[in-house]
Image: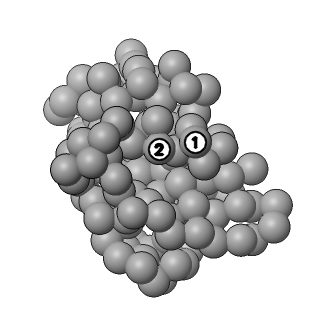
Amino acid sequence: MKICIPTMGENGLDNIVGEHFGRVPTYTIVDLDTNEVKVIPNASEHMGGQGYPPEIMAKESVNVMVCRGLGRRAISMFEQMGIDVYIGASGTVKDAVEAFKQGTLQKASEADACGQHAFRDQHHQGHLH
């Protein structure tokens, strides 16, 4: 299984999780089966390239995208590409992968992601237990 995290640099597992998934400079892809780590540039139209981040990830055969939070339209695009989205990630790529493995991130669906909603859920996620 390949998971992708929007990131702020080229440092692999030590990359910091980016705040805005569409406007980060890089995406870090971690293959949980082989532990291979690949950093790719964000070549989407947000950064002067072409296409959208979900299309870039689909080309890389990503199964899951892990990020801090995102809007309904983006979630819808990921769903159409068959990529699951989990929100609430922070810290480094290593932290985000660990949180995903432990099941502490929230799976995002179009229904629960309208602007403030997504932020509020993500913000209070740690206090739901």
Asked whether, in this view, residue 68 is left or right of residue 100, the answer is left
Residue located at (71% from left, 71% from top):
36
- Mark 1 and mark 2 in contact? Answer it, CB < 8 Å: yes
Secondary structure of the residue carrying tag 2 is helix
Residue located at (52% from left, 44% from top):
57
Residue 23 visible in this rendered orientation of the protein: yes
Which disc, if any, is residue 127?
none
- Please name whichever residue, 64 or 89, is drawn nearer the observer in this view of the structure: 64
Asked whether, in this view, residue 55 is left or right of residue 9, the answer is right
Q: Position of residue 3 (x, y in %)?
A: 61, 53
Which residue carries the number 1 mark?
A: 59
Q: Position of residue 100 (x, y in %)?
A: 60, 55
Which residue carries the number 2 mark?
A: 56
Look at the picture and state if 95 lies above or below 73.
below
Residue 103 visible in this rendered orientation of the protein: no
Residue furthest to the right in view is 33
Residue located at (17% from left, 32% from top):
116
